[in-house]
Each structure stands twice: as structure tokens, then as C-alpha cells.
Amino acid sequence: MPAPELPATTDVVVIGAGLAGLVATAELTRAGHRVVLLEQEPAASLGGQAWWSFGGLFLVDSPEQRRLGIRDSADLALADWLGSADFAADGADANPRAWAEGFVDFAAGELRPWLHGLGVRWFPAVQWAERGGYLADGHGNSVPRFHVTWGTGPAILTPFVESLRQAWRDGLVEVRFRHRVTALTTTDGRVTGVAGEVLAADAGLGRGQRSSREAVGGFEVTASAVVVAAGGIGANHDLVRATWPAEFGALPARMLSGVPDHVDGAMITAAAAAGGQVLNAGRMWHYPEGIANHDPVWTAHGIRLLPGPTSLWLDADGHRLPAPLFPGFDSLGALRHLTSRGHDHSWFVLNKAIMGTEFALSGSEQNPDLTGKDVRAVLQRALPGAVGPVERFAELSSEFVWANTPADLAAGMNALTDSDGHSDERDGHSDERNERSDERNGHSGRIDGAELARTIAARDRQVATGLGKDLQVTATAMARRYVVDRLIRVAPPAAMLDPKDGPLLAVRLSVLTRKTLGGLHTNPTGQVLRPDGSPLAGVWAAGEAAGFGGGGMHGHRALEGTFLGGCLFSGRVAGRAVAAALRA
Ligand SMILES: Cc1cc2nc3c(=O)[nH]c(=O)nc-3n(C[C@H](O)[C@H](O)[C@H](O)COP(=O)(O)OP(=O)(O)OC[C@H]3O[C@@H](n4cnc5c(N)ncnc54)[C@H](O)[C@@H]3O)c2cc1C
């Protein structure tokens, strides 16, 4: 049956059927408003990035935390947030900060009961992401707060997809896939609708796969309000490179994408062209611990290695990253450290036993036990050895280098660097230019076997003391005071060179692009603002397109689990605000 014609006019157009757009749509249709939901991808990709996500949610003072003896509070969480955000003192971050305060309140209050009422549940072992490692008022989570959703990302989407279906049955929503908005239309300075292209059908394309941009028609819809929920810029590497702050060096020519191709930033540009302000474009949340997917779905598909704290983290020349840039402590700090020095990759060095306890991968498809709600498979996580997807990477990925001695490991690492010209790809220019920049950075891009042996032995000597002065060794021992870390996340202290825990392993890590922390500047109700601070009438923004609220509620750094939460919060706020505006 052919789909009914696209309505020429409606109450609200929502752009983007990711988590933020679905939540806004749910709020609007619940209030009885008619919505046209426009999505550039095929129906197979409904839900956007959230479907691929690990489903980790930042919750504060939850029953799961309390059961584990974690003492958390909204005050502590806000103090952690502000220490990580490092908002500008001159008032430029007033709206981002207001959104941050609202979000922390939400995460400590309504978020969990709301989702619980919608049938969402959580894995009881709360994880400790972004541990910080600076002083009390610096970056990081003082306590574990990363709650993995039972069923991961798809389970967070479920209630909102169900709400969309119900609204469709009630005749309140029209959804159009392969409809790509290219412009917000304005009348007398007010946004009054959208215009765009109908894209070729691309039948048979799987979820997350790159779709064609061939236009087969055009459309226009007028509306009383428009909600921009079109995601961030992470798959647009040119834009990511162009907006990365120059003071932290250049991002490498070869990067992996932690997001599907549709995360292209084009709609943020289109909203700016209609008069909206983009705030904090240089604030981004990319990871230095990316590994190429051996079974890619989207372009340059990379997976983030979720590291436990024990692996030694070495730069491309084999030097340990300085304290507190240990695995899992300060993602942005580690990334800035590497890019400032012109390194295009880094290494985790560990052994097989540490891999078995500490390596995990981000993403719903890399955690089939949690995604499939398979209790028996989840319990296996407490047993020795790595989870299945990690074992598969260990077997199939060329970025995992195994050896019995540090000298052989170094030889394997150098062979991998040489084999694909990784260091030569750094800026896409000539070898000669790379050599010149290597000299400037004092950067050889090679691992010295004897030096590597000394580095590991020095670390092992610290572990053998049972006390020690090496901050990574002491922080790792401290982490084991937390029951979840001790049971499933942090390896017991042991010599890395002990052959019974071998062989040794080095994993080459590349920059993995993921989240956009800046975005469309919005006021506390989600309305898009002009550069002069006045509202751009008729348009609201939510999710990553709005920097998760306010044009950057995270400030410079994130505490993790705050992106899905930010979409839930900003989608809900914007949906409710538009509903209220339509009632007025
Ligand atoms: C592998 C992975 C793991 C993650 N894990 C976590 C986690 O554990 N915890 C956490 O908090 N966050 C996590 N995230 C981040 C989180 O999933 C995203 O930040 C969030 O889902 C973004 O949602 P969104 O609705 O703002 O944007 P998106 O999901 O990107 O949705 C935007 C939608 O808009 C559509 N669109 C874009 N432009 C147009 C246009 N011009 N016209 C029409 N449609 C358009 C897109 O096709 C897309 O469907 C993860 C992300 C990934 C990819």
C-alpha cells in the first residue's frame, strides 16, 4: 500500500528519529499534537546511534549504587560535573551550565523512576568510568555511576519506539524515512517549516550502513514548531579535524569512526544558516582507544576498547603517558596529550591474563549477553578469560600483537606500524613532510625493545613491593577496594612479565571519533537562540545537535553515560516546551 502523501502542514516537524527525536515525539504526541517525523536514513536504522550504544546511563544515588555500598548524592555529582566541565567563567557558558545543573538533578531524581515505569532495567554491577585522578575538584567520577541498561541501547529505545507505533495507530504521527531536511524555512524571521530532498529508497540496506545521498524528489512542510534532533558531527572527519582546537595539535589523518555515516553535522550547519547560534564547536568527546572493527558496518568503523586500569599506556615512541593518564581515567586528557605531540596512535601493553579480566568493548553488538538479556552468559563474565567478542578481536584483529618477550613484542609492534604505513598517513602528505614533523616533535614512531623491557620491569618492581610509588600501580590497587572492580573489572596485582599469565600483548590504538559536546545554543526550554541571545522563534533543538542541551551541557569533558541521558532529558524538555508553546 503506498504511504499517504506527506502532509503539507502539521503542528510540529521533528528532524531525526534517533533517541532525542523519538523522546520529543513521544512527549508531543502524548500531549495530542500532530507530528511529522523526518529521517534521512531507511527504516532499518530507526533509533540512530542509541541502538548501537552500550546503554550506559549516568544515574546518581540509585538503588543499584546503594546496594553496592556506594555513597553518592546530587551535590557530589554536580561537584564532579563542574570539575570536569570547566565552564567558562565569563558567562559564555550560562545556558550550558543551567542545562548541566538541570541534568544532574534529573539524573539524581526523575530519570530512573521515569524509565523504570517504562519497563527499563539495569545490570546490577555499576561501572566506574572516567576515574579522573586529579585533585578533589578536578575531572572525574568520585564514585561509580555508569549503569548499563539490561538489554543495552536497544532497550532504552524500546519504550519510545512503542510510543511512536501507538501514536501512528492513533493518527498523530507521520514518519517519513529517506527524507533529508536541507533547510529550515523562515517567514518574517520565524522558522515556519522545513524543506528537503527525498532520497533514493536504498532497499535492503542493513542498520547503520552507509546510505546513498541520491535525491529523487523534494518536499516542504510548514509547521507551528520545528525540533532539530539530527545528531552530531562525529562521522564527518573533515569537520571534526577543522574544529579540533589548534592548541592541542592536529588530529591524525587516519581516524576511526565510532558512529555511523549519518552523524554528518549537516543539519547543525543548516540550522545555523537559518539564524541559530552554534556554541562550543571545538568541544568534542573522541576516544584515543579505538580499534578497527574486523567486521565493519559503517565507514572506517571502529570500536572503543573500554579499558581496565592495569594496562601500560605507551605513546607511539614507547613512552608511558604521564600520570594520571591511565586507561579509563581521563579520555580527553589522553587524547590531547597524544595529538599535542603529533602521535597518530598509541599502545596498550599487557598480558593475556589482564586482557581476560579487563578488556571490554563498547556497543550493543559487542555485548550480546547484555543486549540479549542472557543471564547465564552474563554470569560467565565473573569467570577467568575474556568475553566472546574480545576473544574474537584477539584472534582476528591485526592490531593485537602477541609475543613471549618484550623484544619480540617491540618487533611485532614496529612490524605492524610499518606494514600499513600508519605513521606515514598522519597528515596525508609526503613522507618527507612527515619526517620533518617527526624531527620537530622528536618523535620516531618506533618502539625500542630494550626500553620496553625496562618499562615493564620497572612497573613490575613496583607491584612486587605491595605498596609502591607508581601512581598507576597504587590507583589500580585502590580500585580493587570496590567490589565490582575486584570481581569483574580489575586484575589482581601481578608481574606483567610472569610467563604463567602470558603471552604479552600490545594493542595498537587509534583515535575514534564519537561525540559532539558543543552544538546549537538553546535556552533552558530547548529553544534555539540567535547569536545575540534572542530566541529564534519556531525552533527547538535536542540531543547531540544541541550539545545535549544548551549548546554544550558537558563543558569540556564528560563523565560518561551522560549522552543517552542528555538525549532523554533534552528530548523531554524540548517536547514538553513545544507542547506548552502550542497550548499557549
Ligand atoms: C557505539 C556507541 C556506543 C555508545 N554508548 C553510549 C553509552 O553507553 N552511554 C551514553 O550515554 N552514550 C553512548 N553513546 C552515545 C549516544 O548513543 C548518542 O550520543 C545518542 O544516541 C545521540 O542521539 P541523537 O538522537 O542526538 O542523535 P542520533 O542518534 O545521531 O540521531 C539523529 C538522527 O537524525 C537523522 N538526521 C540527521 N540529519 C538529518 C537530516 N538533515 N534530515 C533528516 N534526518 C536527519 C540521522 O539519520 C539520525 O537517525 C554511544 C554511541 C555509540 C555510537
Image (tube, rainbow, N blue to C red):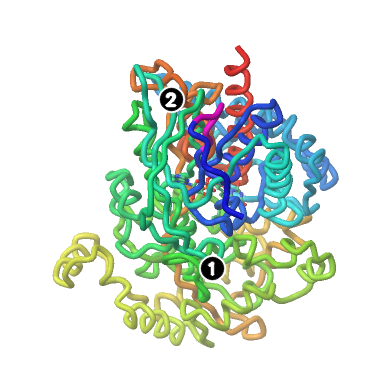
Q: Farthest residue to the front: give it.
A: 1
The numbered dot on residue 136 is none
Instruction: Write down the residue under mark 2.
Output: 192
Q: Is any atom of residue 82 visible in this view?
A: yes
Q: Residues within 10 Å of mark 1 (few under 14, many from 20)?
A: few
Which residue type carries mark 2? Thr
- On whether residue 12 falls in the magenta region, the answer is yes
Q: How many marks?
A: 2
Q: Quick one: SS at disc 2?
A: strand
Q: Residues within 10 Å of mark 2 (few under 14, many from 20)?
A: many
Q: Residue at x 24, y 60 (%)?
A: 441
Which residue type carries mark 1? Gly
Mark 1 touches mark 2? (CB < 8 Å): no
Q: Is any atom of residue 492 visible in this view?
A: no
Q: Quick one: SS at disc 1?
A: loop
- SS assignment for the magenta stretch, majority: strand
- Marks 1/2: CA distance? 35 Å
Q: Is residue 161 left or right of residue 332?
A: right
- Most foreground residue, 253 or 502: 253
Q: Position of residue 41 (x, y in %)?
A: 49, 54
Q: Which residues are magenta?
A: 9-14
Q: Quadrant of residue 373?
A: bottom right
Q: Is residue 302 left or right of residue 166?
A: left
Q: Residue at x 63, y 25 (%)?
A: 576
- On whether residue 580 falls in the magenta region, the answer is no
- In the picture, the quarter occupied by the N terminus is bottom right
- In the picture, the quarter occupied by the C terminus is top right
Q: Position of residue 226 (x, y in %)?
A: 49, 30
Instruction: Write down the residue under mark 1.
Output: 204
Q: Position of residue 379 (x, y in %)?
A: 82, 67
